[in-house]
Image (spheres, coloured by chain):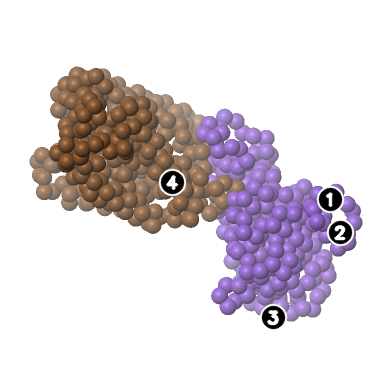
Chain colours: A purple, B brown
Amino acid sequence: MTEALPETALPETALPETALLEIRGLEVAFGGFRALDGVDLTVGRGELRFLIGPNGAGKTTLIDVITGLTRPTGGSVRFEGHDLVGRREHEIVRLGVGRTFQTSVVFEELTVLENLDLAASFRRPLWSLLRRRREVSEEVTAALETTGLAGLAGSRAGVLSHGQRQWLEIGMLIVQRPRLLLLDEPVAGMSSGERERTGELLTEVARDHTVVVVEHDMDFLRRYASQVTVLHEGRVLTEGSVEQVRADPRVQEIYLGRAREGAEDAVR
Amino acid sequence: MTAPEQSARRWLGPAVFSAVAVLALVAAPLLLEPFRLGLLAKYLCYAIVALGIGLAWGQGGMLTLGQGVFFGLGGYAMGMYLKLNDAAGDLPDFMVWSGVEKLPALWKPFGNPVFALAMVVVLPAAVALLLGALVFRQRVRGAYFAILTQALAAALVILLVGQQGLTGGTNGLTNFFDFFGNDVAADETQRGLYLLVAVVLGALYLGARQLVRSRFGRLLLAVRDGEDRVRFLGYNPATVKTLTFAVSAGMAGIAGALFVPVVGIISPALLGVVPSLELVVAVAVGGRFALAGAVLGAVVMGYARTYFSEELPDAWLYLQGALFVLVMTLAPKGIAGLAANLVRRREVRA
């Protein structure tokens, strides 16, 4: 079966080949603990998918497996027909999968512009990196605009606020032109103003990218999510629209049953 | 940074570089007596190694405690050529003394100056490439990498000392007479060598500076500060580190090769663990985050070593240790960091 089929308007259940990301029976065990216990997940092209679930549900582990940080003990991850399991991190990035981290890691010694430029240059041959940067590429300029960091282009990334760092990270992702973006808790620890700005950014990015967002924040979810997958104890509990998922009594139970934990997460 | 500040910075670097170049190329040969000029030439050789350490450690975060290995490879490559050249078809003197009857196969190609000079860079760089490819791919880093490089320096010393007939053992290679048609001991030759060392150092410094300011240099900093994050930008940090390590090894090799005619000897004692460590200390004192700091550190520590060995021979080792501790705790950016602070403070006041 090949991935080269033309994109059609058929529902993905009828034609799973149009899926960008296909995860089947994914298992990850840390010692005796099964972090992922047979996860199936299909993400279609152009989708904005939210991945939610209480602490320890395996959301970040799932992203770690997709991006090559964690090796699964079983199952498969296919991205545009490529099997991602066993590939090294930078190879997966080169296939077109980009991610951010919960705690943003931008390069503090470099300026905002340099961070973006470095991210944008990763497809250049190594020898061409030996030349000094003479100009700012179009995509970097665009990313500076999109993320609202144009005014800070010359500042060291170390002086950015938490929110600005996350935006810079998202900007660094965009300039890499990935076909799949994985955002791990992009609004964790953000002020409400920053959340708002991140939501707008997300909507904008999702317009021409396939995006998977791991998020705890229910309020953020209500405002920006369309399709939601709920993970619970390493399995997919349910999938659907925000309304469907919120109406699901099992979802209510795991969230209400762990309300305190959820609240802690929200302030983290 | 404001615009005027930036333009002030822009001329400050080239101005200082030009001033130092004039001092080194014109003033020093005129003012220093031959013995002192020879010492300075030696320090500048060390400064070339230090430049490489600054690149690998300061910019790339690779604490290499075994640069002596690469220095030695370059030095022995040059030494072997000079010995063969002096022997003029016979066996080198030390081989005769150790009862070697036929020139070892390893030595033969080094009779060719082009081959020997190429090996000065190729050999250290190749060893570093190999080591880097093995080690960085496996994500060995930090203290483990440091210990590994140090072990390599110790191992090379044992190897060299053990192969008396092949390497001259503990004595190393010495007693050189001719350096490309010049009497190596003559003041004139030594002055020429000094100028050669200074020019090579200057050129390598400019090259390294260009590297640091390029995208590759930015990438190198990124690898130093967040190797794992760099992977998720689609780069392979192992490649970046391996290449940089090889460049720094090549520099040490060149330094070793220049050291041999300047000082007249290359021996295991000059490239083992202790000299390797001393250079790292010098780079730390000078300031590892600035290439100029690394160079400065090597020269300053070279002078300090000579001064104290002449005046207070017993105290030097302790002083060196104390200085290292002081710098690491009080001024982790070394002399270069202190100087940068001064410049910044003056700019703020202005």
Where does the image place residue A40, in percent across and percent down from the top left?
75, 67
Residue B139 vs residue A256, the one in the foreground: B139
- Badge 2: residue crowd in 10 Å (few <14, some 14–19, many ≥20): few
Which residue is found at the position 18% from the left and 26% from the top?
B177
Circle 1 SS class? loop
Q: Which residue is mark 3?
A: A257
How far apart, in angstroms, are the residues tagged by discs 2 and 4? Answer: 48 Å
- The amino acid marked with disc number 1 is Leu
Which residue is found at the position 60% from the left and 48% from the top?
B234
Instruction: Say yes or no: labels 2 and 3 on the same chain.
Output: yes
Tell me whether the residue at label 3 lies in contact with that at label 1, contact meaning CB atoms closer than 8 angstroms: no
Left or right of B268: which side holds B130? right
Q: Chain of mark 3?
A: A
Q: Which residue is mark 2?
A: A15
Choose the circle earlier in sequence order: 1 or 2: 1
How far apart, in angstroms, are the residues tagged by discs 3 and 1? Answer: 44 Å
How far apart, in angstroms, are the residues tagged by discs 2 and 3? Answer: 37 Å
- The amino acid marked with disc number 2 is Leu
